[in-house]
Image: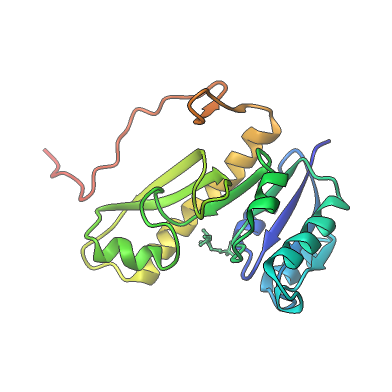
Amino acid sequence: MKSIVILISGRGSNMEAMLAAKLPCRIAAVIGNKADAKGLETARAHGIPVAVVAHAEHASRELFDAALAAEIDRHAPDLVVLAGFMRILGEAFVRRYQGRLMNIHPSLLPAFPGLHTHRRAIEAGCRVHGCTVHFVTPALDNGPVIIQAAVPVYSDDSEEALAARVLAQEHIAYPQAVRWFLEGRLSLDAGGRVRLDGERRGTGALLSPSPDAR
Ligand code: GAR
């Protein structure tokens, strides 16, 4: 059976969604970069091995990345899943796990890389916002897109309301992307884009605001 390692920095709700999805893999470990990351407690409660590689205890990004890689490699995972892992990883680290390092970002990339994505989507007047699961490349919040989920943005939305609407979709999209990986259905085409073996075509479109009923 394949195995994955999940990296978190905080709440860990995407990690919890992975656990709830009953993926066909062993979750070899959950690793946090802060000892007080709430998701670590959740992982422990599920009996999953937990480790902390504290960025604050490493003198440079390179040393932190190397310690993190050493901890990951102890488990020899097939896939490394960044689930709200809020440290920028260096090029050597990313290259080491190329093709088996996934991230979720709370925007429809390439729109809004970086922080405060929900606020920025509201301020930009977007009518649609969402999340993206992608393979990680050395550029921040960049890399071949595996799945995106779109949600409407309402005129009176608060940042919190929009974040909650997106997060609910993250919990669906991310386990699905990992499942496709585990099933061996993801590949890259000559243009560096993701191909999903057996891709299903949806029939609906999201119009936001909703058109008038007729
Ligand atoms: C999620 O919304 C995730 O998309 C975001 O952090 C949150 C973590 O929540 N990730 C990023 O912004 C990465 N650039 P969680 O700890 O409850 O999964």
How many numbered marks does the figure carry? 0
- Residue at (39% x, 63% y) in the render: 117
Q: Quadrant of the C terminus?
A: top left
Up-down: is 204 above or below 126?
above
Q: Quadrant of the N terminus?
A: top right
Coloring scheme used: rainbow
Q: Percent from the top left, x then y, of residue 115? A: 44, 66
Q: Quadrant holding ligand 1?
A: bottom right
- Residue at (49% x, 55% y) in the render: 105
Apparent side of residue 46 relative to residue 56 in the rendered image (left or right): right
Q: Percent from the top left, x then y, of residue 160? A: 39, 71
Considering depth in this image, is 70 or 29 the residue closer to the camera? 70
Considering depth in this image, is 103 or 19 the residue closer to the camera? 103
Considering depth in this image, is 165 or 33 the residue closer to the camera? 33
Apparent side of residue 97 relative to residue 168 in the rendered image (left or right): right
Apparent side of residue 45 relative to residue 101 in the rendered image (left or right): right
Kindly give the residue lying farthest to the right in the view shown.
74
Q: Percent from the top left, x then y, of residue 185? A: 63, 26
Quarter of the image holding residue 12?
A: bottom right
Apparent side of residue 142 relative to residue 126 in the rendered image (left or right): right
Up-down: is 149 above or below 89?
above
Quarter of the image holding residue 8?
A: bottom right
- Residue at (52% x, 46% y) in the render: 133
Q: Percent from the top left, x then y, of residue 203? A: 34, 27
